[in-house]
Amino acid sequence: MEGSVREPRVLVVGGGFAGFECARRLARPGGPAVTLVSPEDYFLYTPLLPEVAGSVLDPRHAAVPLAESLPGVRVLRGVVADVDLDEHTAEVAVPDAAGGRTERWDRLVLTPGSVTRVLDIPGLAERARGLKTLAEAVYLRDHLLGQLERSASLPPGDPACRACRTVVVVGASYAGTELVAQLRGLAHDAALHYRFPASDLHVVLLDVAAEVMPEVGSRLGRRALEVLRSRGVDVRLETTLRSVQSDTVTLSDGQTLPCGTLAWVTGVTANPLVGRLPLELHQGRAVVDEHLQVPGRPDVFAAGDAAAVPDPTEPGSVTPPTAQHATRQGRTLARNVLASLGGDRLTPYRHRDLGLTVDLGPGFAVANPFGVPLSGLAAKAVTRGYHLAALPRRANRLQVGLDWLLMATSPRPLVSLGLVHPERVALDGGQREAAAPAR
Ligand SMILES: Cc1cc2nc3c(=O)[nH]c(=O)nc-3n(C[C@H](O)[C@H](O)[C@H](O)COP(=O)(O)OP(=O)(O)OC[C@H]3O[C@@H](n4cnc5c(N)ncnc54)[C@H](O)[C@@H]3O)c2cc1C
């Protein structure tokens, strides 16, 4: 139409912490036309995944529906398979649409997050499971319950029985440590239910580092270690996996342990999409400047786990892959995308560390809000309060709060739904998914 001006189009790749926050803030009357591409129709609040694996929370309660939470945003279910940075187009593989579709954009926001980093350890990719998705958390829960149920029908001294009752978690950063605490709680309750002594369980946490959770500081790390060990978790530091066999794992010190449940939570690497694009990378993450803009590409922005964002508090380093950074970078993204469309000045990314909260199972947590070290019930209250405040939808907050109340007043639900096929949670699944989105 003569005289009419087309709305600028913003394409957001990924509906995680950074993409969700950016899209939410961009969608406003008179603003650009925003399309968010996501393989899932929900935003996943990952900090609650260990509690989903431990059957404390219902999986749906950690999933925030995108369509309802992002009014004014066009949510396109699919996977961005390729981007032409010169032509300003993106190829999106969409379920049920053979050949996918082409999306045009004026501003591109790259926030596809990260995938589990898999090392070249024999047997690892085939037998271990990660903890990045809801499917993985549900699978771990179901698998462990299945193993414990099976063990109850085997003679206690039998090697197969010992394997079923052994859980090994590799990676003692906050995610792995929370997971081992939750799986231990689940296994204990299941032992009572299946009528075998909880002392038959062997729950192991491995890490190559000399301490657990270096992110929370050595004082809280030591406190967490004491509590885990007092609850029977066999924490082995400066130790990792050498190989994985069908019912056993061999450790770096040469010891072989029976093992029926193996979780690999040793860290993440940027989503492979950014490596396929002609972008400068820093340790696999897309290089951006302090405005979250890709150098030499003023129309392309990136943030979150997929981007190497300069950390203003530690010149020369980049921000760690955390939800806290991704959410706040999402806000800066929205502001700068709008500024770039309006020809205004861009704002540099700044942050103040709010600290970390780590839930370690019944009655215990560690946290360092604003640098104040807390442990025990005070930290538990801070941890839960933080998650309730950070969850972006009231119904999810109520559901999670209710789950916690039920956990405190009723037996843990020991239900193995068996809905997740092992193939769906293979450790290289993230990369396979990028080629073929889940239906
Ligand atoms: C178990 C666990 C516990 C954690 N606990 C904490 C915590 O307590 N505190 C904290 O600060 N951080 C925590 N983190 C880290 C935090 O989850 C990440 O740093 C954060 O999710 C990064 O946000 P993001 O937006 O970059 O990526 P994500 O939140 O991972 O979102 C990326 C999105 O992009 C989608 N996507 C991927 N590829 C494509 C594609 N090609 N096309 C379209 N969409 C795509 C993905 O499906 C996903 O929805 C935890 C992580 C895990 C795994």
Image (cartoon, rainbow, N blue to C red):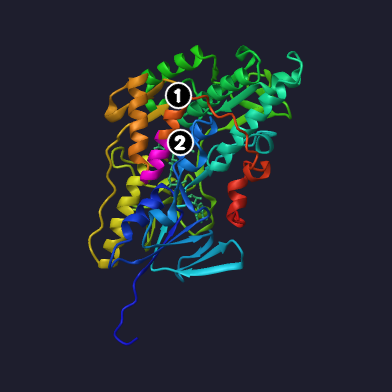
User: For this rendering, which residue is in front, 412 or 9?
Assistant: 412
- Chain part drawn in magenta: 393-401
**What residue does disc 2 label?**
48
Q: Evaluate if marks 1 and 2 touch, with contact meaning CB atoms under 8 Å apart.
A: no
In the picture, the quarter occupied by the N terminus is: bottom left
Identity of the residue furthest to the front in this view: 410
Q: Identify the mark nearer the N-term, 1 or 2.
A: 2
Q: Residue at x 61, y 68 (%)?
A: 99
396 in the magenta segment: yes
Q: Nearer the viewer, mark 1 or mark 2?
A: 1
Q: Is residue 218 above or below residue 102?
A: above
- What's the residue type where badge 1 is placed? Thr
CB of mark 2 near ligand 1 (< 8 Å): yes
Q: Which mark is residue 409?
A: 1
Q: What x and y, as percent, mark residue 271?
A: 51, 49
335 in the magenta segment: no
Q: Residues within 10 Å of mark 2 (few under 14, many from 20)?
A: many
In the picture, the quarter occupied by the C terminus is: bottom right
- What's the residue type where badge 2 is placed? Leu
Which quadrant of the structure image shows residue 339?
bottom left
